[in-house]
């Protein structure tokens, strides 16, 4: 698969200023994995103003970028988006403005490719939305988590939304079905989390005094038979935070094959649930251009609706 046969020279525009060169290249070398982009930058095949740069170099207006021709081996190329995925993503957009879009991310789809994942949501969307010259993730969701995911359609919007995220002006709420009765008066879970190697290259998270502090607010929405529907609001943004904190509180999420319990997995099977019951149900953030709050809700998919309905019937 050939990405291009001739060297291209691209001038950096005002709205692209401050962007890292590796991210700039990823949006222009569609199909090229991150590893290949880092390699051509390291080898000096990419130049800025005829000089070598590092992958973390930040562009300035007027910079002239040399983009080399790339020939991708089949094992390196990002997978072409299928018609089914194309249609799924097209129907999953919840709301869109000139600067951003919010999508109801399907469960089972990684937000980006890599580590054996040939295509992620961001790569697929860049193929589907060829009209967009810029598209970047503002935040991430676990592969098995569904719901509200925010993407920026301009560099200035990305910087503004990242600032809102950093200053806790963005509110993300999740619905989770957990095993057991949620402990009374346990509205907050604060526990330090540490990432570790679980073997076979898999990275997991555990509660550890040496880890980084993480806080999650939980609110009971509905008490069911040996299960509880809770709303979770992460105050901090650690990897797998809601899942690990729920398990730490004695109520692991249903369908969680990493941090769940045997009882929770049995309950999930009984409900016909074959995925993690964790859904980013709502997102509120300041509109980049005006600062006015934008609030968006994402409906549950059919598998979660069915599992919840069966859980209610078991009362």
Image: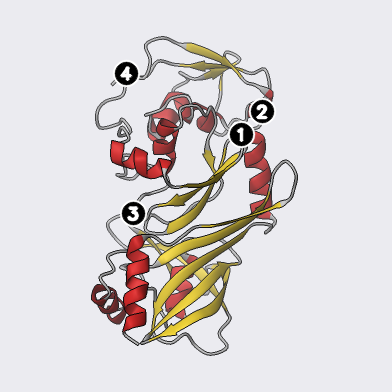
Query: Disc 2 marks which residue?
Result: 15
Question: Residue drawn at (66%, 41%), measured in percent from left and top?
Answer: 159
Q: Which disc number belongs to residue 117?
A: none
Q: Which disc number belongs to residue 154?
A: 1
Locate the C terminus by quadrant: bottom left
Identify the mark nearer the N-term, 3 or 1: 3
Question: Residue drawn at (33%, 33%), measured in percent from left and top?
Answer: 78
Q: CA distance from mark 1 to mark 4?
A: 27 Å
Q: Residue 190 vs residue 73: left or right?
A: right
Q: Select label 2 or label 4 by which is in front.
A: 2
Q: Residue 6 vs residue 76: left or right?
A: right
Q: Residue 102 vs residue 40: left or right?
A: right
Q: Are marks 3 and 1 in contact (CB under 8 Å)?
A: no
Identify the mark nearer the N-term, 1 or 4: 4
Q: Are marks 1 and 2 in contact (CB under 8 Å)?
A: yes
Q: How crowded is the residue under tag 3: few (<14 C-alpha within 10 Å), some, or many (20+)?
A: some
Identify the mark nearer the N-term, 4 or 3: 4
Residue 252: image x %, image y %? 39, 77
Q: CA distance from mark 3 to mark 1?
A: 27 Å
Query: Disc 3 marks which residue?
Result: 108
Locate the N terminus by quadrant: top left
Q: CA distance from mark 4 to mark 3?
A: 29 Å
Identify the mark nearer the N-term, 1 or 2: 2
Query: Disc 4 marks which residue?
Result: 2
């Amino acid at each position: 698969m050939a990405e291009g046969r001739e060297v291209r020279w691209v001038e950096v525009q005002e709205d692209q200023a401050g962007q890292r060169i590796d991210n700039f290249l990823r949006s222009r070398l569609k199909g090229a994995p991150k590893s290949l982009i880092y390699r051509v930058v390291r080898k000096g095949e990419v130049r800025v103003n005829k000089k070598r740069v590092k992958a973390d170099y930040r562009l300035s207006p007027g910079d002239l970028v040399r983009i080399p021709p790339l020939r991708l081996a089949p094992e390196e190329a990002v997978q072409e988006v299928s018609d089914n995925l194309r249609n799924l993503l097209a129907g999953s957009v919840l709301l869109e403005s000139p600067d951003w879009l919010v999508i109801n991310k399907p469960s089972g789809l990684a937000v980006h490719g890599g580590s054996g994942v040939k295509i992620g949501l961001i790569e697929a969307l860049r193929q589907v939305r060829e009209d967009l010259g810029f598209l970047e993730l503002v935040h991430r969701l676990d592969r098995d988590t569904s719901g509200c995911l925010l993407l920026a359609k301009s560099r200035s919007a990305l910087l503004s939304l990242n600032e809102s995220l950093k200053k806790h002006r963005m509110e993300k709420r999740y619905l989770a079905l957990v095993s057991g009765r949620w402990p009374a008066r346990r509205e907050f879970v604060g526990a330090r989390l540490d990432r570790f190697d679980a073997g076979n290259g898999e990275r997991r998270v555990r509660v550890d005094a040496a880890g980084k502090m993480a806080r999650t607010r939980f609110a009971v929405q509905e008490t069911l038979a040996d299960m509880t529907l809770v709303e979770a609001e992460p105050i901090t943004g650690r990897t797998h935070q809601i899942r690990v904190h729920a398990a730490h509180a004695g109520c692991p999420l249903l369908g969680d094959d990493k941090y769940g319990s045997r009882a929770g997995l049995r309950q999930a099977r009984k409900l016909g649930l074959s995925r993690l019951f964790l859904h980013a149900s709502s997102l509120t953030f300041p509109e980049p251009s005006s600062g006015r709050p934008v609030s968006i809700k994402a409906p549950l998919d059919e598998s979660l609706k069915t599992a919840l309905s069966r859980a209610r019937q078991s009362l």
